[in-house]
Image: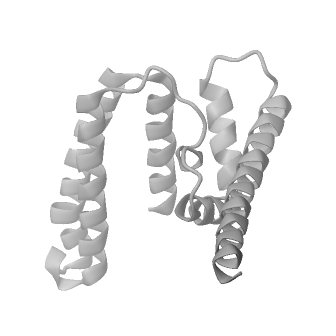
Amino acid sequence: MLILQFALIVVDRTLYLRKFILGKIVFQFLLVFGVHAWMFFILPAVTERQFNAAVYPQIWYWVKCVYLLLSAYQIRSGYPTRILGNFLCKNYNYLNKFLFKGFMMVPFVFELRALMDWMWTDTSMTLWDWLKMEDIYAHIFQLKVGTIHFIELTSNLLLVLMLLF
């Protein structure tokens, strides 16, 4: 099941990077029918329990429904004309900093995203150059967030010192 989830993530990322809306629509329909067939027919037949007998299948189903809803909104809105970088690196605040650090701490997720981006983006860069570019971009983001927070901290500290004296 975990390998299937991984494959679905890769297919979805591929369709996103290639901006293939028709493929996304077909993928969405197959996923809707597959998830519902699995949860309401196959899983109860295999486990001999109803869908609502356990909490974990209900949580998985709820997460899949939210994913399908967001995917439908993505189909409705269309893909962006340009896909630039990591969505966590758009703003420089504490939330993005900690989410990005968590993203970087998960083993091989950064490398997998960079590999998929390189494979399905039209570029003349080699894989190693692409990985270097992604690493530099990640490092610059972390430095910029740190610098912005340092400036905010020192300006607040100077303001407090000026009010005290």
Report whether 155 appears left or right of 69.
right
User: What is the number of callouts on the image?
Assistant: 0
Expressed as whole percent of the image width and height from the top left, the position of residue 13 reads: 49, 38
Q: Quadrant of residue 123?
A: top right
Q: Can the viewer see residue 26 in this picture?
A: no
Report whether 103 appears left or right of 25.
right
Extreme residue toward the front, this view: 165
Expressed as whole percent of the image width and height from the top left, the position of residue 136 reads: 80, 42
Q: Can the viewer see residue 121 in this picture?
A: yes
Expressed as whole percent of the image width and height from the top left, the position of residue 47 reads: 26, 77
Q: What residue sits 52% from the left and 42% below the top?
A: 10
Q: What residue sits 19% from the left and 79% below the top?
A: 48
Report whether 85 appears left or right of 130.
left
Placement of 97 over or under 92, stated as above or below: below
Expressed as whole percent of the image width and height from the top left, the position of residue 147 reads: 75, 56
In the picture, the quarter occupied by the C terminus is: bottom right
Depth check, front residue: 31 or 103: 103
Placement of 85 over or under 22, stated as above or below: below
Q: What residue sits 71% from the left and 59% below the top?
A: 151
Depth check, front residue: 44 or 120: 120
